[in-house]
Image: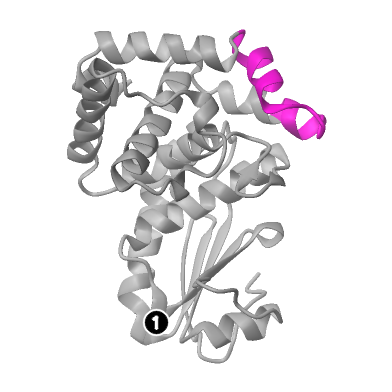
Amino acid sequence: MGSFLVESQNQKFELKSYRVYFDIKDGIAAEEILDYLDRGTADLKQVFSLESDPSFEVYIYPDLAGIERVTRHPMGMGETSRIMLDDGAMLLSAQHLPKNLGEEILKSLCYSIFNRGVKEREIGIMQHRTPSWLREGICQQVPLRARRNSNDYLHAGWISLQEAHKADQLIKPALMLKNINFIPDPARRQLALHQAFFMVRLLVSTYSDKFFKRYSTLMGAFEDMESESAFRQTCNLDYEKFFTMFKDWVRSTNAWAAISE
């Protein structure tokens, strides 16, 4: 392990199957990362049907040049971190740490587990085999429940969904195939992210720990299978029928019940 070490990373935190390598001046950031990974472990195992704790390494470099040096690949425009899927590692720059650091690390680990499980790949501009609402919804489950103000944040999100439902403004799955993080209208983008989280929350509560296991088994085994076909075999529902089920849930469920599902 420690495949991406450089001389400045003279410190290591290790807990369970997680390791964080860093310079001593970045100790507070390393503590936050390890804390979030630890607190998210139980949910990671449930959502992704894992039998053991996932392995993940995080490297904090002084700057972006350190990431370029160990990967031998220049950073793209706007790129401030790098996930090494095959190695189960994330490379960060101390100069560009995200505001919600622990939450972002957990989300990156979720992307890593998800992408490996379904053998994810891009099929178009800003579009993967799995629709964005389903991919984002699954990968938000653990980080959003681990965040410090989780209940308040999710409660506000559920209320916004109920208001959108009353105004007939919930977003159809067919409109959330491409990356919902790039929806230009901020309010609509935030609604899409809330909706993706709770759509998958309904899946997780309905199928317990079986949804991702079944879906990823099909997607991983049949790389030409369309996502909706794998979804239908997993749930006995197509996307539109599931959306109808979701709308009924939004209409009939109070916020605290929805959060605790």
**Residue 124 placement (x, y as % from top left):** 69, 45
Q: Residue furthest bottom?
A: 7
**183 or 160: nearer the eye?**
183
Magenta-drawn stretch contains 220: yes
For the C terminus, the quadrant is top left
Q: Main secondary structure of the magenta part?
A: helix
At mark 1, the secondary structure is: helix
Magenta-drawn stretch contains 255: no
210 vs 16: above or below: above
Q: Is residue 62 left or right of residue 125?
A: left
Q: Residue at x 40, y 33 (%)?
A: 197
Q: Quadrant of residue 158?
A: top left
Amino acid found under the numbered disc labelled 1:
Gln
Q: Is residue 126 left or right of residue 254?
A: right
Q: Which residues lie in the magenta part?
A: 217-236
**131 or 107: nearer the eye?**
131
